Image: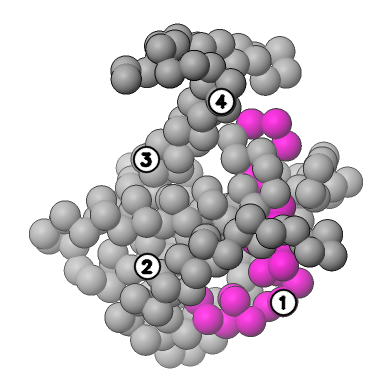
């Protein structure tokens, strides 16, 4: 991890980000992801800010790390689904990678923005990705519509219309849980199998096997 001029870059994660995007075999989708990377203000925030203020991945660069974990785990999960097309799998991976992109509007380096105190980050996702989505719409209409659906679908809406969408929610929870466990056991010796983590007024109780 390197901090320069107030911007925190995790170069290992950055390399993984570029590498993941270049593995996308569906050309319009790869071009979409590249166009997102070309948005300098968006990407500067994306690689800099934490994923949360006090919860999971609450450190500079945490949003990038969490997003990559979700994308890579989604890639592994949907990769085992025989009856799901390569196109749908890669759209799911892309959705997982950018599912929290709206946080660049709601989180600063150390605290919520004034906007973030009023509006949930999910409401900014499609707005921030509007131009790349419009380009994707021109070259691959079905892919653009599927990506928008996966970026905005919530479990409150009922069963996801694309089976791959379930992988995104699952990996999001798994990445979050792993981060909380790391926080809980950070200063504990290896023989500790139980830890308590307090976040605000909430307490989390976590176990591990060594």
* Residue 133 falls left or right of residue 141: right
Q: From the top left corner, tell me how far across and down residue 68 is, in percent.
A: 47, 56
> Compared to 81, does 188 lie above or below?
above
Q: Is residue 113 visible?
A: yes
Residue drawn 51% across the image and 29% down it: 182
User: In this rendering, would 159 be left or right of 83?
Assistant: right
Foreground: disc 1 or disc 3? 1
Q: Secondary structure at mark 2?
A: helix
Q: Quadrant of residue 96?
A: bottom left
The residue that label 4 is drawn on is: 186
Marks 2 and 3, how far apart at CA: 16 Å
User: Which is closer to the viewer, label 1 or label 4?
Assistant: 4
Please name the residue shown 41% across and 85% down the image: 28
Q: Which residue is mark 3?
A: 170
Residue 145: image quadrant is: bottom left
Q: Look at the image and tell me whether residue 184 can be seen.
A: no
- How far apart are the alpha carbons under marks 1 and 2? 23 Å
The residue to which callout 1 is attached is 40
Q: Name the residue located 47 percent from the left edge and 85 percent from the top edge.
A: 31
Residue carrying label 2: 91
Between marks 1 and 2 in the image, the one whose residue lies nearer the viewer? 1
- How far is disc 1 from disc 4 in space, using C-alphas? 34 Å
- Residue 100, given in percent of the width and then of the height, sits at 58, 53
Q: Are marks 2 and 4 in contact (CB under 8 Å)?
A: no
- Give the mark nearer the N terminus: 2 vs 3: 2
Outermost residue on the bottom side: it is 139
- Residue segment shown in magenta: 33-55
SS for callout 3: helix
Q: Is residue 45 magenta?
A: yes
**Dot 3 surroundings within 10 Å: few (below 14), some, or many (20 or more)?**
some
Q: Secondary structure at mark 1?
A: helix
Q: Earlier in the sequence, mark 3 or mark 4?
A: 3
């Amino acid at each position: 991890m390197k901090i320069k001029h107030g911007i925190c870059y995790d170069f290992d994660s950055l390399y993984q980000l570029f590498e993941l995007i270049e593995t996308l075999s569906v050309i319009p989708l790869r071009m979409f992801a590249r166009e997102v990377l070309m948005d300098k203000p968006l990407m500067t925030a994306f690689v800099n800010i934490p994923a949360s203020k006090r919860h999971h991945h609450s450190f500079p660069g945490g949003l990038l790390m969490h997003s990559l974990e979700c994308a890579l785990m989604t890639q592994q999960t949907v990769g085992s689904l025989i009856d799901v097309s390569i196109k749908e799998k890669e759209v799911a991976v892309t959705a997982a990678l950018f599912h929290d992109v709206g946080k660049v509007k709601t989180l600063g380096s150390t605290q919520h923005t004034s906007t973030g105190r009023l509006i949930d980050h999910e409401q900014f996702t499609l707005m921030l990705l509007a131009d790349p989505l419009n380009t994707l719409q021109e070259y691959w209409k079905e892919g653009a519509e599927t990506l928008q659906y996966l970026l905005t679908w919530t479990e409150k809406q009922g069963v996801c219309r694309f089976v791959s969408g379930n992988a995104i929610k699952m990996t999001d929870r798994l990445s979050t849980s792993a981060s909380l466990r790391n926080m809980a056991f950070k200063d504990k010796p290896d023989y500790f199998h139980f830890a308590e983590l307090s976040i605000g007024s909430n307490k989390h109780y976590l176990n591990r096997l060594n």
